[in-house]
Amino acid sequence: MSGRSILAQRVAPLGTTVFSEFSALALQHGAVNLGQGFPDFDGPDAVKEAAHQAIVSGINQYAPSTGLKVLREAIAEHGARFHGHTGIDPDTMVTVTSGATEAILCVLLGLVDPGDEVVVFAPVYDSYDANIAFVGARARHIPLRPPDAAHPTWWFSPDEARAAFGPRTRLLLLNTPHNPTGKVFTREELAFLGALCAEHDAYVLSDEVYEHIVFAPARHVRAATVPELAGRTVTVSSGGKTFSLTGWKVGWIIAPPALRDAVQRAHQFVTFATASPLQAAMAVALRLPDAYFEGLGAQYHARRERLLAGLARAGLSAQAPEGSYFLLADISQKGLGDDVAFCRHLVTRVGVAAIPPSVFYPPEHKHLGRGLARFAFCKSDAVLDEAARRLEAGLR
């Protein structure tokens, strides 16, 4: 064999994800895992039964690459019902994907060329920068800054946003509600970003997988419903977070026909199609009564408050997130080092796993995450209570 590296350059810089690393440590040390963001409870029985019925009734062969028509229609109805996103043609504006993660890669493959620039907010969900690198583009980061005396929620500087856009900007990658900060972008912020995109003729990928996990007074605004963004936005979402079925990996994109066609051209050669019986069941899920979606928000609000109270008893202050099922706690006064050292101490000595947020930042902004730790509250009350007990005993 030659001395040439086995690894292609696009994957050579990528190691094991921080989620896998800390989940393995949690298992090794018997820790309560508040790191990786998947629920420890199951989705609605009616939806699981719909998947079973789809299997036994023979919906087991390839779906059309764009997705089962019944699901594309349900996605269009859902957008109008909950977000005022009307006029979605299920035949020309929707593609079903294998989770939001595949959708994001296919959007980048379909719209972004090597050498283009993609604007993204930091902290950045880890797959974003990896996928931007896969397509040969360059990420330009706008830092989100924590609440302060002048800003009650996470915020960004308009000047820093303007500076991130330039002649090579092709796409703005937006995440609202945002992981890991819990920020929900306002209509005014979206309009401002839309004006920047219009000025630079850039498209928008709006990752909205936490669209139903939002806490008053915040309100989720679908980017595609903002006039400044309507004609240039690809909306990405999935059923994993809303229906506690993350292992199903059923996602989708909604976009104007020309943008949808660009994404579809990539999707047909990445996965071609997503599991047919799960698509049929997800159509049932999206048509559940309003009471289900209202109950989801109420349940996550209660879990958020439960974890905030437990962290407070352990001497950790945290800003209540506006959306998603993550929160960032201030660890700067604990004297246990930066976020990586703190989270290693937490999982090995205290018995609770959290995620160090500095891994979500590019090198120039890592300092913004070093005084924080990310905790997930998509867990049962018993698990949250046990984590709180261990934190109080181990950090007090």
Image (tube, rainbow, N blue to C red):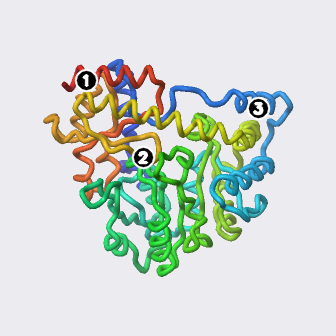
- Mark 3 nearby-residue class (10 Å; few <14, some 14–19, many ≥20): some
| Tags 2 and 1 touching, CB below 8 Å | no
Which numbered dot is residue 6? 2
What residue is disc 1 on?
392
Q: Please state which of the two labelled residues, at mark 2 or mark 1, is closer to the viewer.
A: 1
Q: Mark 2 or mark 1: which comes first in sequence? A: 2
Q: Is residue 369 left or right of residue 266?
A: left
Look at the image and tell me whether residue 368 can be seen. yes
List x then y, in percent, for residue 5.
38, 49
The residue furthest front is: 217
Q: Nearer the viewer, residue 294 or 269?
A: 294
Looking at the picture, which amino acid does disc 1 mark?
Glu
Q: Mark 2 or mark 3: which comes first in sequence? A: 2
Q: Secondary structure at mark 2?
A: loop
Look at the image and tell me whether residue 126 can be seen. no
Q: Tell me the quadrant of the picture where the C terminus can be found.
A: top left
Q: Please state which of the two labelled residues, at mark 2 or mark 3, is closer to the viewer.
A: 3
The residue furthest right is: 57
List x then y, in percent, for residue 350.
26, 23
| Tags 2 and 3 touching, CB below 8 Å | no
